Amino acid sequence: MADLRGLPSIERLLQDPRAAALLLEFGRPLTLDGMRSVLDSARQDAKIDAPIPDIDEILNRVTDWLHAATQTTLLPLINATGVILHTNLGRAPLSTAAMEAVQRVAATYSSLEFNLETGKRGSREVHAEALLTQLTGAEAALVVNNNAAAVLLALSALAKRRSVVISRTQLVEIGGGFRVPEVMKQSGAHLVEVGTTNRVHLRDYVTALEESSPALVMHAHSSNFRLIGFTSEPALKSIIDAVHEHAVPFLDDNGSGALLDTAAFGLSHEPTVQESLAAGADLVCFSGDKLLGGPQAGILIGKAALIQKLKKHPLARAVRADKLCLAALSETLLHYLKDGAVEKIPVWQMISASPDDIRRRAQRWKNTLGFGRLMEGQSTVGGGSLPEETLPTTILALDGYQPNQLLARLRCNNPPVIARVEENCVVFDPRTVLPDQDEALLDSIISVTQRNKS
């Protein structure tokens, strides 16, 4: 075993001039932890006759240890996959105005729960409610921290220990293992399934209404799958009309939060929030960070009496939205009110980007790099919206590299770059790369491709 007397003491390390910089940057407690850890590792290595590192090497290892210990894991990155609403990558990026609103509210105190007119306690619920009601025509609105929480709150407040009717075609599981039946069970509601896996008829709902006397009838967005073939499902308005004949409220889990018609952009039609209300839904819930293009949030709109019950329920406080969410959401909604959503919200900028503009951008990438080739490809919306729907794009493909190895190098870059593999090539889709990320993307590609090819 190597002679451990060659290892410097903690005190000796602290006396070295380079330690002063570490103490200043990382603080004394963490720096001492790093020194102890590195010295312990050196002692363990010495047991297998590894050489004793000198003080320079020890301090280098301490510096590496401190940087690793203080590296955050939630990092900004470049999404070159072509998936617009990529759940793993944080879904919708915020507009510039929404980011500025977050910064303004985060950096100081705010009127979150303070009424400036009366000088008394106010409610955080008012900040987005007026915008939502004006935009959608709903009587009232409530914002919680995500759409799963919105569903859970609605069921808990309106149907605990009572029956909720839902079609078997809508008992979905989405990303992360979120299952509609399990959320309903957690709320205390009793699930009443109607129809079959692929077909449900209006008479199925009517029978359930007559036999189970439910507290609520629920309709759920199919999210990330589509039923095709021998299928049947009544129109939403027909279901709602039948439900209202039995004086039962109707909850529509719209999911994607579309306020614009996706068919106008070459996609199939995604049911909009306004259509749910127009069909007569008493409550509509949807996500803030999908097609709405805002922050993570669960939004409930509908009849004032029902929304009021939700606001008063104890669970409402546990799932409420914070000030940063409300700030970003309010600015996002203002884009719609000012008829500027397509121009200002990144999700809609990406969806509406023309094939010619995308191709020109991909060509600029290729010209700047001096290598790669252009391919025709397809972008997807993602995020549980418009399953199997694609948009034409032009992608930059890199040949001659081991795809998995190149993807790994890109992920380890600063900033990380997330791409995809197609035809055994790593490809980059301009549609989902933000305009101000072009230089960083190209620098990353140059950096990682300078290493040895496979």
Image (spheres, helix red, strand yellow):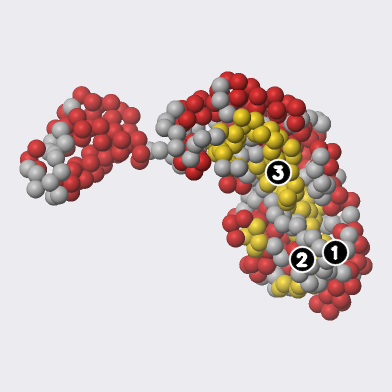
Determine the residue positioned at 65% across, 30% down. 374
Q: What residue type is labelled 1?
A: Glu
* 176, above or below 194, in the image: above
Vertical arrangement, residue 373 with respect to residue 298, above or below: above
Q: CB of mark 1 within 8 Å of CB of mark 2?
A: yes
Q: Where is residue 400 in the image (x, y as percent from the top left)?
A: 51, 35
Q: Residue, x 64% and y 22% (percent of image)?
A: 364
**Secondary structure under badge 1?**
loop
Badge 1 or badge 2: first in the primary sequence: 2
Q: Which mark is residue 233?
A: 1
Who is closer to the viewer here, 308 or 266?
Answer: 266
Residue 152 image-quadrant placement: bottom right
- Tell me the residue that label 2 is attached to: 169
Which mark is on residue 381?
3
Q: In this view, does 344 lie to the left or right of 40?
A: right
Dot 1 crowding, Cα within 10 Å, few <14, some 14–19, many 20+: some
Q: Which amino acid does label 3 sit on?
A: Val
